[in-house]
Amino acid sequence: MSDGSELLRMLEPAVRPMGAPGRTHAPQSPMEQRGFDQLLREAEHSDEMDALRFSAHAIERLEQMGVELSEAQLEALNAATGEAASKGANDSLLMMQRLGMIVNIPNRTVVTVLTADRMQSGVVTQIDSAVMVDDPEAI
């Protein structure tokens, strides 16, 4: 860089000498530089990143129990996970009907699955929150 004015052009609009007028025309934002198709692909990818995942252990437990979750149930669980995250939860028990899932909220991962029968003692440890999830399949 040959002088300070080059550096100022690179840093503007975040840094300006005191009393210097602002830009009359702002550069295009990154969103304006990308096309609609690109933004749509990024949004779809973002949704995939936010989707609830299941550990191998949780999948095995669901299979052993003969439980298949519908798309609507998965959406309800995903929404409940988001709600727990917004409250600062780390490890939550999500209860849907007689099915409980321990979810690591920051990783959005179901760690294990429990039925009400398996929770005979009524005590679940190593969680910091519980969320009651309405089952969209229940009548």
Image (cartoon, rainbow, N blue to C red):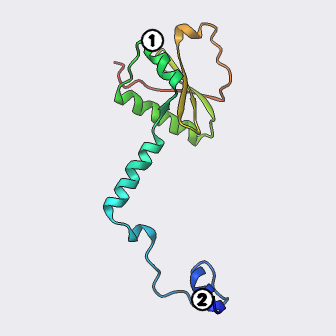
Please determine whether, in this image, residue 89 is positioned above or below residue 101. Answer: below
Q: Nearer the viewer, residue 87 or 3?
A: 3
Please say whether residue 125 is visible from this viewpoint: yes
Kindly indicate whether the residue at mark 2 contacts the one at mark 1 (C-beta within 8 angstroms). no
Residue at x 38% of width, y 19% of height = 68
Residue 6 tag number: 2
Dividing the picture into quarters, in which one does residue 25 lie?
A: bottom left
* The residue positioned farthest toward the left in the image shown: 37
Residue at x 38% of width, y 67% of height = 34
Q: Nearer the viewer, residue 41 or 93?
A: 41
Image quarter where the N terminus lies is bottom right
Q: Residues within 10 Å of mark 2 (few under 14, many from 20)?
A: few
Label 2: state its secondary structure.
helix
Nearer to us: label 1 or label 2:
2
Say what amino acid the circle numbered 1 marks. Answer: Met
**Residue 136 placement (x, y as % from top left):** 37, 26
Rounded to the nearest angstrom, the CA distance separating label 1 from label 2 is 66 Å
Dividing the picture into quarters, in which one does residue 28 lie?
A: bottom left
Q: Which residue is mark 1?
A: 65
Please say whether residue 95 is visible from this viewpoint: no
